[in-house]
Image: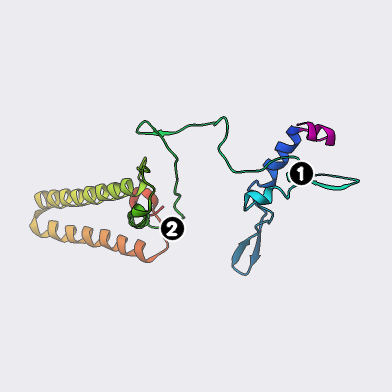
Amino acid sequence: MNSLSNLGISTQSLFQLLKTQNEVSSAGAVRIGDDYIRVKPTGDFETVQELGNLIISTGQDGAIFLRDVAEIRRGYVEVPTSLLSYNNEASLTLGISFSKGVNVVEVGERIDQRLAELEPLKPIGMHTGMIYNQPNEVEGSVKGFVQSLLEAVVIVIVVLLLFMGLRSGVLIGLILLLTVLGSFIFMSTSTLNCKGYLWGPWS
């Protein structure tokens, strides 16, 4: 603190400089033909050592780097802002976001496969658990939708057979089945995305 005070640098300005230096922000995009290329600015800190090269002030004697006034090392926050426990044990969380247009169920299966491959490499005493499994939820919703669809079709066909006779009921029932089947074929071959209310696996 004395070194910062002698240099005329406040701790608040230093904290603000560190916060803005590695802040993730959009730098815009450039359109080339039909594609948009995102512009990513350089200057992010990749290692702990690179933090020391941050210029915090300039003077007559030259630039003053962060390493000149502070000891830089990797460690835990002395006063953590948030604590997480899983099964009453201190834990770390890892969240996975799905890209647009991917099959959530298939990605979930690949994640489970990769976790099984990494199981022998885990340190002794480390355990993994699942807090929320979106692929399982999506798969369940898809199965529920298919079951509801089949039940609805069967009920409609039975009602048609009872009130319109065998011939008319079978004819209209086949038309209904062909219409539903055609809708599925159309949506699977086109770019139409029905999100969770119909095509559950797609994010």
Q: Position of residue 56 (x, y in %)?
A: 78, 43
Q: Residues within 10 Å of mark 2 (few under 14, many from 20)?
A: few
| Tag 2 residue | 101
Which amino acid lies under the numbered mark 2 shown in the image of this protein? Answer: Gly
Q: Indicate the quadrant where residue 75 lies.
A: top right
Answer with left or right where residue 148 lies relative to residue 58.
Answer: left
Task: Judge by depth and name the residue closer to the eye, 179 or 163.
Answer: 179
Task: Judge by depth and name the residue closer to the eye, 174 or 154.
Answer: 154
Q: Position of residue 78 (x, y in %)?
A: 58, 32
Answer with left or right where residue 190 lies relative to residue 36.
Answer: left
Can residue 108 be spotted in the picture? no
Helix, strand or loop at mark 2: loop
Task: Look at the numbered discs 1 and 2 and tell me whether their residues touch, using CB distance below 8 Å.
Answer: no
Task: Judge by depth and name the residue closer to the eye, 54 or 27.
Answer: 54
Magenta stretch containing residue 9, yes or no? yes
Placement of the N terminus among the 4 image quadrants: top right
Can residue 89 be spotted in the picture? yes
Coloured how? rainbow
Q: Residues within 10 Å of mark 1 (few under 14, many from 20)?
A: few
What segment carries the magenta color? 1-10
Distance CA(mark 1)–CA(mark 2): 49 Å
Answer with left or right where residue 15 lies relative to residue 59.
Answer: left
Q: Which mark is residue 68?
A: 1
Task: Judge by depth and name the residue closer to the eye, 192 or 83.
Answer: 83
- Residue drawn at 26 percent across, 58 percent down: 180
